[in-house]
Amino acid sequence: MRKLLKTLEERFFFVLMAGSTAFLALLLLMIITIIVYKGLPSLTWEMVSQTPKGGYYFGREGGLLNAIIGSLYLASGAVALSLSISLPLALAMNVYFRNRKKLVNGIRFILDLLWGIPSIVYGAFGFTIMIYLGIRASLLAGIITVSIFILPIMVRAMDEVMKNVPLSLLESAFSLGSTRREVAFKVVTRQCFPGIITAVLLAFGRGIGDVAAVLFTTGYTDNIPTSLMDQTATLPLAVFFQLGSPIPEVQNRAYAAALILTVIILAISVATRLLSRKFHKTSIK
Amino acid sequence: MENPIISIRNLNLYFEKQHVLKNINIEIPHNKVTVILGPSGCGKTTLLKTLNRLVDLHDHVKISGKIMLDDKDILVPNIDVTGIRKKMGLLSQKPSPLPMTIFNNVAYGLRINGLRGKRKLMPLVEKHLREANLWDEVKDRLRDPASRLSIGQQQRLCLARGLAVNPEIILADEPTSALDPISSTVIEQQFAELKKHYTIVMVTHVLRQARRIADHIVFMYLGEVIEQGPAREFFNNPKEQKTRDYLKGAFN
Amino acid sequence: MYNFVRKTKDTISEAWVKFVLMLIFLLPLVILASLLNKSWMVIQTSGIGDLLFSSVWRPMAGQFGFKPFIISSVYVTVLGLIITAPVCLLSAIYLTYYGSKRMTAFMQPIIDILAGIPSVIYGVWGVLIIVPFTGRFLAPLFGYESTGFSILSGGLVLAVMLIPFILNILIEIFRTVPHEQMEASLSLGASKWESIKHVAVRRSLPGIVSAFALGLSRAFGETIAVLMVVGNVVGIPRSPFDTGYPLPALIANNYGEMLSIPMFDSALMFAALVLLMVVVCFNLMSRYVIIFMEKRQ
Ligand SMILES: Nc1ncnc2c1ncn2[C@@H]1O[C@H](COP(=O)(O)OP(=O)(O)O)[C@@H](O)[C@H]1O
Ligand SMILES: [Mg+2]
């Protein structure tokens, strides 16, 4: 009798567990399906090759080119800016100060902390910096804000790979007479190159998809930005602003923007996966 | 052999494509210490884990052959695996106390089998801790986490924990290899005591240990059984060339 | 000459690395200081107590009671966690202990993609699926009247967004349970499920608790997806089918008017400060829980 109960309990939970795991797969399918279903009909050539006509909120004509280009500018700029800080930082943790356990753990703690801060807080912070520096909402302000927001994401991802660089590799490089810079920026950077690219892609994905950090800082415009001081549209903002419009054509632009954004994210995910597969084949272990 | 408690017939085991156990035939005598001897990597641990079907946990294992325990084949698919495991206590290479108190470690198996209430559990816990020669050292701190014990004490706790489910057989996989010499001796002495009531199957690659405690020896090499028989005969009068080489230390 | 160039490069990069190191230690402080500085004005005039516990929200009159927003935030967050916790725990156990290698290899990219989907996409999905589902199906089922834009919708969308986040941490935690302990439990005659319950879950408890704590803090700051489905009406929600207005949504929705009403920007920065403090506290707490409970084990 007890035995039967035990077996029943295990069966019951097994079904629940398998069910909830299957549910995850279903969930993803459901989300992608609805985004494609809504977005695909509006995804015409006009949509990706023109800027909105007659205002993004009221104009029935035109497309999303401003948001597509704006997003690419913003995310690339932020990633580039963030890279100049995150790469040296990751190298500092794993080459320069590898033997200073306390320091490195302190940095890891701060990164965890920064990583947990919601993007809306970064948005608010970016806004205060903007005011302090006396610049208006612009591509530049957006790039600065997003680059701070993706900094912990990038460093953590790089740290994850660099941690695994065997000490023996560093030692042999040092014993050939290399300086710390050469070991860090040549040996380790080369050894971890695919990992760094993965970190960049990850951060790019985060940066391109976020609304809350850029809401206060980039502004929004129908035009393609021509300088860092111009305001700019982005894809997630295009979704966010246009979805609320009463005009169906404008709403369709929001759905199309959602689809484009999803496709970009999926492409990044596939690229990351291919890269890490290749990485496992070629790295020195 | 008369009435072996376990007899293994034509056992073959593969991890993916790797042939780890090759046509094994072994008989294990009742209430004796059987030592499985062999250089590391020859499949001793795998053999032991096949006996209580812990190998089931691995992906991609393929097993064929028979393991007869009380005239029943324990490798048939729909047998009561937990019942078999209960008949065999396992002592692993590194002691692995469960993440709970000393008391609960011993009581764990009893509770799993439906025994409840501290009043019923306490005498049994004491009895088995005494059997493992640990009671005097821990009786005042049964509520401490087991992880606070020394490694040697942990191993004896694992022994007590195993004894608590009333096994017929104790499987021990190099149980003293992680222990200091004194704790090792205690375990060995305990085995000599326990074989009055239990069948003990112990894996080791230490020849001296085998000489000290074995009644029966199974010598394995690269997944095959080379020679088996009573310990005295094995050490004094080995039949196979490989055994002689091994005894001379040629493999080490 | 070559040596000179090499030396200069070394000096410059050494300096840059040190600068970057300093930057990372300063960044949290700068963020904290700037938010504190901005919200100082409203703290001075209204007082922390009034800001946190008053429910009078009249920005034009200079009255900023954040209680409705804080309650909405807590409501949505806790609801989201309650919905997501069992799903995460069950899936994590399944993927670690029951699923085959192929199964895990199939699910990992799915989890990763779910983790990468931007919150605005979850928001669109929420508006299209979850809001009608709550409004037309769940609300009548429980005898409520609702447009669907509600606390519950926010909770459901949050729950889904939290899954990949919490699940990944949980899987990581279960993988650190030593194989030998599971084997020990099994060889005492425990079934697989019993071993999981009494050994794996028990051992991982501190980790599980802190994974949920981290999930909670992540949920608390989630902005856009929740904003899109939660209704954004000021007021203290009385049921899950009521509309809500969480703190992040408040900040996001008012960025335009921020500078036209006196002290409004200061009040919104105060809201951001509250978010920051909550996240920092939960982070520290989850760390503390792990350390504390590991000592006891
Ligand atoms: N889970 C496993 N998967 C694949 N191969 C394994 C596994 N466990 C053991 N092996 C292989 O089986 C062989 C025997 O291992 P083992 O039984 O541990 O030897 P011993 O205990 O005698 O040292 C080794 O070659 C080992 O690599
Ligand atoms: Mg072994």
Image (cartoon, rainbow, N blue to C red):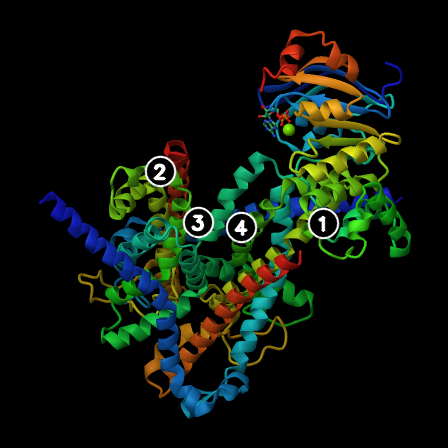
Which numbered marker is on residue A36? 3
- On what subunit does the disc labeled 1 rest? C
**Where residue C244 sits: x, y (%)?**
54, 74
Q: Do labels 4 and 1 share a chain?
A: yes
**Where residue A192 sits: x, y (%)?**
34, 42
Q: Image quarter for residue B191?
A: top right
Q: Which of B183 and B105 is in front in this view?
A: B183
Residue placed under numbered mark 1 in the picture? C197
Residue placed under numbered mark 4 in the picture? C168
In the picture provided, is B126 more to the left or to the right than C2?
right
Q: How crowded is mark 2: few (under 14 residues within 10 Å), some or many (20 or more)?
A: some
User: Mark 3 or mark 2: which is in front?
Assistant: 2
Mark 3, secondary structure of its residue: helix
Q: How crowded is mark 1: few (under 14 residues within 10 Å), some or many (20 or more)?
A: few
Which numbered marker is on residue A169? 2
Residue at x 41% of width, y 83% of height: C267
Q: Are marks 2 and 4 on the same chain?
A: no
For the residues labelled 1 and 3, the Cα–Cα distance comes to 41 Å
Q: Earlier in the sequence, mark 3 or mark 2?
A: 3
- On what subunit does the disc labeled 2 rest? A
Dots 2, 4 in contact, CB < 8 A? no
For the residues labelled 4 and 3, the Cα–Cα distance comes to 27 Å
A15 over B191 or under it: above or below: below
Residue at x 54% of width, y 69% of height: C149
Mark 4, secondary structure of its residue: helix
In the picture provided, is A135 more to the left or to the right than C194?
left
Dots 3, 2 in contact, CB < 8 A? no
- On what subunit does the disc labeled 4 rest? C
Q: Ligand 1 near label 3 (Cβ, under 8 Å)? A: no
